Image (cartoon, rainbow, N blue to C red):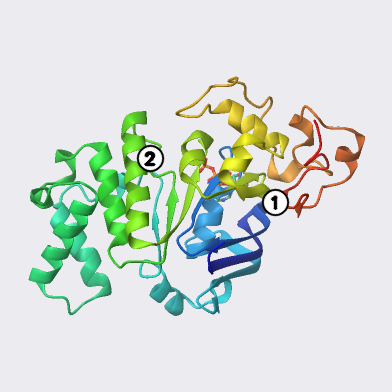
Amino acid sequence: MAETILEIDNLTSGYQVKQGRVEAVKEVSFKLGSGEFLGIAGESGCGKSTLAYSILKLLEDNGQIFSGSINYGGQNLATLSDKAMKKVRWSKISMVFQSAMNALNPVITIKEQLLDAMYAHRPGLKEKEAIARAKELLELVNITPDRLYDYPHQLSGGMKQRIMIAMAMILQPDIIIMDEPTTALDVVVQRNIIEKIGDLQEKFGFSIIFITHDLSLLVEISDRLAIMYAGRLVELGNAEEIYKNPAHPYTEGLMASFPPLVGEIKEVGGIPGKPPDFFKLPTGCKFETRCPYAFARCKKENPEFKSYDSSGRLARCFLAGEER
Ligand SMILES: Nc1ncnc2c1ncn2[C@@H]1O[C@H](COP(=O)(O)OP(=O)(O)OP(=O)(O)O)[C@@H](O)[C@H]1O
């Protein structure tokens, strides 16, 4: 892997609720390489957004990082002050939120919204320069510069989402976190946007953490994949290798739920049952209650997240690397 730009170590974060702590992210560790495209997939509620918001320290009021570290640029973001975090957020690590396009203000033109975002970080910027930069950003996401003077309602959903991607790139960050950036759009538009993101990444070299529940979107574009279940990473490794041979039964089930956009469709299956309640997690393997391969040991012991062969792939399953 290229030089590490972000290292998450044993991160546990989540929310304080009446019943106690929801540990929506539990002991998660991974490294993100410079220029790497890391895809994170898992069913709704497995903690993907909580992980993203933890990195940027944008958790809701009842949210909290309980333990672990988020190392970026020689600092631990998990313990960084709000003031210091403001220097990192957007300029070094930015984010495109789930249905971000709805965050565009309907009564203000795209120009004003882009310029406001620029002035917020570079107060001395001259208007002429800011407009030139705004036009350049629109062109990067394949929107003609004259659209700068439009209001959001004059643009399609795909265009609005591309504008949000342009916004995330304004300050040329090292890392862009994308949380389901295309979910609200139809499949063809989704694909165009993802291709565009890939082009931009190649051109500018930023790293991407791309979060989705739709694994088929990730397989082709990601360098590596991380699969989350009940707040934990259950598999992490090279995207193509995971696709060819998933080591964790949950990954296998996810693959079957989302057939690839291109290539052979094996079998459209799915995963029986639903994700567990964070307050009633099984004692052993957290996936045991839904796993077609579970055996006695899985009920009692929680498998470690570890490398099981020479490829460096990590998986949390007693059967990883074995014939299932
Ligand atoms: N503010 C909150 N207070 C309490 N629990 C929360 C809060 N926000 C999220 N959760 C819970 O944390 C868990 C993880 O949620 P999260 O949104 O991170 O999952 P996700 O994988 O991103 O799901 P989705 O794809 O639906 O956004 C869920 O059980 C969710 O109900």
Q: Is residue 66 visible to us here?
A: yes
Task: Indicate if the residue with disc 1 has its beta carbon within 8 Å of ligand 1.
Answer: no
Residue linked to disc 2: 182
Is 174 rendered above or below residue 209? below
Q: Nearer the viewer, residue 130 or 255?
A: 255
Residue 236 drawn at (x, y percent): 64, 49
What residue did someone put label 1 on? 311
Q: Nearer the viewer, residue 62 or 44?
A: 44
Seen in the image, is 307 located left or right of residue 149? Answer: right
Which disc, if any, is residue 267?
Answer: none
Amino acid type of the residue that numbered disc 1 sits on in the rendered structure: Ser
Q: Pointer 2 and pointer 1: residues touching (CB < 8 Å)?
A: no
Residue 45 appears in the picture as rendered: no
> In the picture, residue 131 is in which quadrant?
bottom left
Q: Is residue 159 above or below residue 173?
A: above
The reply, left or right, for residue 169 in relation to residue 22 is: left
* Quadrant location, the N terminus: bottom right
The quadrant where residue 267 appears: top right
As measured in the structure, the alpha-carbon distance from the residue carrying label 2 to the one carrying label 1 is: 32 Å
Dot 2 lies on which element?
loop
Report whether the residue tagged 2 is closer than 8 Å to ligand 1.
no
The image shows residue 157 at horizontal and vertical percentages of: 26, 38
Left/right of residue 109 with respect to residue 97 in the rendered view:
left
Quarter containing the C terminus: top right
Q: Measuring 42% from the left and 72% from the top, which residue is drawn there?
A: 88
Closer to us: 276 or 42: 42
